C-alpha cells in the first residue's frame, strides 16, 4: 500500500498477509499495525494487573499480553479478561494445560512457544481449546529456546533454524485445520531477528508479530527496537508490534507508537517536532518540550506541533505543522497556526498558550472527522 503517492520516496508497500482476529482487533491484511505490550505484575494480583492493562490501553495499546505461569494465574485471568478494555493474549510456556485454561478463561489469543510447550499431541490439545473458545494463536519462535533437533542441525540459533521452527509449527496448526494464527521469530540480536523475519515473511502469508526480544532498558532498548523494527516496517513487514523494554509497559506503547508515527504507519496524539537547542535559542527548548509532552498526553487526535528555539529553522518547520512556536527576542516568540505566522506570545505564557491552541485544534479536527462520517 502506498502511503503517499505524491512523494514516492515515502512509499511503504506492506507485505500481503491474511487477516486474523485477536478479540475485536483485526491483525494483518489492510488493518492498522496493532501495538501491543505485556504486563509485568503478578497475574494473581488482579487489581494491579488490571490497572496496568488499563494504563497501557489509555496510552494506546490495542492488545495486552499477560503471563499465565500457573493454575492460580489461569483463575485470575478470567477476571482480568472481564475487566480489560482491550483483548488479552495469554502468554503460555512449558505447561500446555495453561493454554487450555487460558482459552477457557476468555483469552483472545494464546501465545505459545513451540520449543517449550511439549510434544505435538499436547499442541493439538491447545489447538482444540483455541478453536472451541474462538481464540487465535501466536506461534512465538525465540532464538533462546529453539528445539534441540534444530540446534543440532544448524549448530547455533540462526535465521534458517528459526524459520524452520516456525514452519514446522505452522504445519501442525494447518494439519489440524487451524488457520487463525500469527507468527513471530524473535531474537535479542537485531541482525538475527531481521534476517529471520525476512525469511518467514517470504515463506508464509500469516500475519507477523514483530519484536526484538529482551531489547534492554528504556534508552538502549528503544534504540535497538527502532533500528530492528523500523527497518522491517519500512520494508513492509509486520502486522503487529511489541517493543520489549525493561521499563513500564506504558513506555513500550509510547515507543511503539513513535516508531509507527515516524514511518507514517499509525497516527495518534501530538507529534512534537523540536530542535536540540543551542546558544541561539530564545527560550529553554528542552524544559519546554518536556513539559509539553507531559501536558499533552491526554490528546489522542493525530496532529503536529513544532517547538523551535530560533528563526533559523523555526518558520520552515512551522509551515508543516498544525501549531508552532518559534523563539525570537526580547522574551517572546511567534505562534504559528496551520503553517502561518499568527501572533506573538511571551515566553512566560507560552506553554499554557500552546496547550490551549493544541486543545482547540484537536477539537476542530475531531469535529471535522465526526462531520465527515
Image (tube, rainbow, N blue to C red):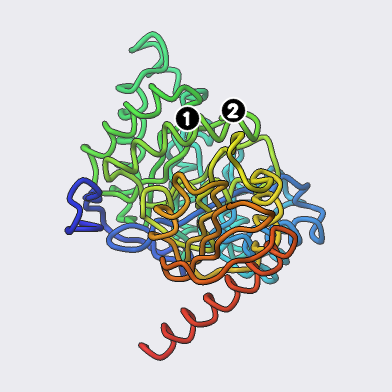
Residue 148 rendering spot, x and y as whole percentages: 45, 18
SS at badge 2:
helix
Q: Residue furthest front?
A: 330
Q: CA distance from mark 2 to mark 1?
A: 20 Å
Q: Nearer the viewer, mark 2 or mark 1?
A: 2
Q: Look at mark 1 in the image and give the residue it sits on.
A: 142
Q: Quadrant of residue 269?
A: bottom right
Q: Look at mark 2 in the image and give the residue it sits on.
A: 220
Quadrant including the C terminus:
bottom left
Mark seen at residue 206: none
Residue situated in front as seen by the camera: 70 or 369: 369
Give the mark nearer the N terminus: 2 vs 1: 1
Residue 1 makes an appearance in the image: no
Relative to 119, 69 lies left or right: right
Relative to 15, 85 lies left or right: right
Q: Are marks 2 and 1 in contact (CB under 8 Å)?
A: no
- The residue drawn where x is 49% and y is 34% is 225
- How crowded pointer 2 is (Cα within 10 Å; few <14, some 14-19, many 20+) is rated as few
Q: In the picture shown, does residue 61 fall above or below 160? A: below
Residue 338 rendering spot, x and y as whole percentages: 43, 70
Quadrant including the N terminus:
bottom left
Amino acid at each position: 500500500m502506498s502511503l503517499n503517492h505524491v512523494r514516492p520516496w515515502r512509499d511503504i508497500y506492506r507485505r500481503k498477509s491474511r487477516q486474523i482476529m485477536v478479540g475485536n482487533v483485526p491483525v494483518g491484511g489492510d488493518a492498522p499495525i496493532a501495538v501491543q505490550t505485556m504486563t509485568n505484575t503478578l497475574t494473581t494480583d488482579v487489581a494491579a494487573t488490571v490497572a496496568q492493562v488499563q494504563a497501557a490501553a489509555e496510552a494506546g495499546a490495542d492488545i495486552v499480553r499477560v503471563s499465565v505461569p500457573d493454575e492460580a494465574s489461569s483463575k485470575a485471568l478470567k477476571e482480568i479478561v472481564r475487566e480489560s478494555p482491550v483483548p488479552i493474549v495469554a502468554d503460555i510456556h512449558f505447561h500446555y494445560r495453561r493454554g487450555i485454561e487460558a482459552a477457557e478463561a476468555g483469552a483472545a489469543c494464546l501465545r505459545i512457544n513451540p520449543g517449550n510447550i511439549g510434544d505435538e499431541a499436547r499442541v493439538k490439545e491447545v489447538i482444540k481449546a483455541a478453536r472451541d473458545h474462538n481464540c487465535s494463536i501466536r506461534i512465538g519462535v525465540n532464538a533462546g529456546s529453539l528445539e534441540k533437533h534444530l540446534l543440532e542441525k544448524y549448530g547455533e540459533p540462526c535465521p534458517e533454524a528459526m524459520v524452520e521452527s516456525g514452519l514446522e509449527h505452522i504445519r501442525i496448526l494447518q494439519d489440524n485445520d487451524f488457520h487463525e494464527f500469527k507468527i513471530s521469530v524473535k531474537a535479542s540480536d537485531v541482525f538475527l531477528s531481521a534476517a529471520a523475519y525476512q525469511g518467514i515473511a517470504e515463506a508464509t502469508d500469516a500475519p507477523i508479530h514483530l519484536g526484538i526480544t529482551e531489547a534492554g532498558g528504556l534508552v538502549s532498548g528503544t534504540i535497538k527496537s527502532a533500528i530492528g523494527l523500523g527497518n522491517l516496517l519500512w520494508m513492509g513487514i509486520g502486522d503487529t508490534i511489541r517493543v520489549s523494554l525493561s521499563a513500564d509497559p506504558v513506555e513500550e506503547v509510547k515507543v511503539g507508537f513513535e516508531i509507527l508515527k515516524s514511518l507514517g504507519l499509525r497516527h495518534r496524539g501530538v507529534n512534537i517536532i523540536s530542535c536540540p537547542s543551542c546558544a541561539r535559542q530564545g527560550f529553554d527548548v528542552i524544559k519546554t518540550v518536556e513539559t509539553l509532552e507531559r501536558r499533552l498526553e491526554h490528546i489522542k487526535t493525530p496532529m503536529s506541533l513544532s517547538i523551535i528555539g530560533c528563526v533559523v529553522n523555526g518558520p520552515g518547520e512551522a509551515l508543516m505543522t498544525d501549531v508552532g512556536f518559534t523563539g525570537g527576542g526580547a522574551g517572546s516568540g511567534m505562534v504559528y497556526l496551520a503553517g502561518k505566522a499568527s501572533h506573538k506570545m511571551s515566553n512566560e505564557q507560552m506553554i499554557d498558550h500552546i496547550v490551549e491552541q493544541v486543545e482547540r485544534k484537536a477539537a476542530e479536527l475531531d469535529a471535522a472527522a465526526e462531520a465527515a462520517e
